[in-house]
Image: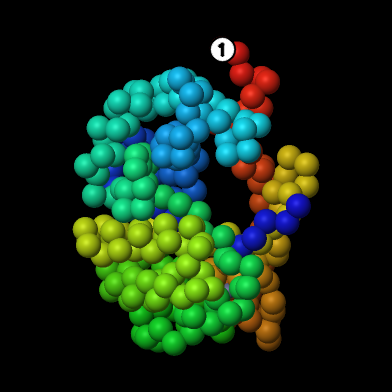
Amino acid sequence: METPEFLCWAIEQQCSLRELLPENQPDKVERHLRAARYAAEARAQNRVQSDLARSADGLLGFSIRDALAMYGGEEAVRETCGPCPANALARLRQPSYAGCFGLLPVPTASQSFYQQFNDLPADLFPRTTIAWYGLWMPSPLTLAQVECLVARFASVTASPEWSDDLSLREFAAALQTCADNQLPLSVQLYPAGQIDGPWWNLVAHCDKCRAPWQSIAGKCGMCGLARCPADGKKRRVRGTRPYRPIEQLTT
Ligand SMILES: [Zn+2]
């Protein structure tokens, strides 16, 4: 199975749920807070019966009490995330627990999507052949960079082609939240990949700009910085945690 190129983002904000997490590593935030997010999404979509949250297709489930115990329980999560200035997704739905991170897969019509970012001010971001790749080289983004992207993502999400894309709307809400509350936004771009059994293999890519590797005159053809592709690190597939097959859940 193929996986698309995607952006992992997290608003930098210390809180009791994120106490031991390193800064500027959005993938770790996603892994650590995913259970809280899934619980809130299940509640918002009426997929919770007593303590059991079911997936939209009904095949997977998890116990909200068990999954949220590591944060001190659902009440503690509600109290922490409710008033939090980094809870960007509270702009889109309620309840919203851990609305401070997200994943943005690049839409399938990727070329026309990339083109939306070609004319951003050249002095704000590192220069790359396709401007999109330069946007995510700095992390966390500065306030000036965030403010520039707020306007652009607002216009992209308003266009009919992408208005139904929830991940895009979530990222636009994150940008707006960071601009309004002056919070840093950390970002990491992941290249497209392939799932092979338990392994998730990314295509050969540049370590600096994360674009698929294409060498021009001995350097990355996208950013001109790297001289060889990134080391092919072994990655495990993301898995469905905290969701598990319903038949494996004990009551
Ligand atoms: Zn590069």
Q: Is residue 188 visible?
A: no
Q: Is residue 119 visible?
A: yes
Question: Which residue corresponds to the image point at 26% horizontal and 35% vertical from the top-left?
Answer: 80
Asked which quadrant contains residue 119, the reply is: bottom left
Q: Percent position (x, y) of residue 142?
A: 31, 68
Q: Quadrant of ligand 1?
A: bottom right
Q: Amino acid at mark 1?
A: Thr
Residue farthest toward the right in the current orientation of the protein? 197
In the image, taking residue 176 as reference, residue 119 lies left or right, namely: right
Q: Percent position (x, y) of residue 221?
A: 63, 81
Colour setup of the view: rainbow
Q: Is mark 1 within 8 Å of ligand 1?
A: no
In the image, taking residue 97 as reference, residue 207 lies left or right, namely: right
The correct choice, above or below, for 27 with respect to 207 in the image is: above
Question: Which residue corresponds to the image point at 35% horizontal and 60% vertical from the top-left?
Answer: 173
The correct choice, above or below, for 206 with respect to 232 in the image is: below
In the image, taking residue 227 as reference, residue 139 lies left or right, namely: left
Q: Quadrant of the C terminus?
A: top right
Residue farthest toward the top in the current orientation of the protein? 251
Q: Nearer the viewer, residue 238 or 168?
A: 168
Question: Which residue corresponds to the image point at 64% horizontal and 60% vertical from the top-left?
Answer: 4
Mark 1 = which residue? Answer: 251
Asked which quadrant contains residue 111, the reply is: bottom right
Q: Percent position (x, y) of residue 131?
A: 50, 80
Disc 1 is placed on an element classified as: loop
Q: Nearer the viewer, residue 225 or 52?
A: 52
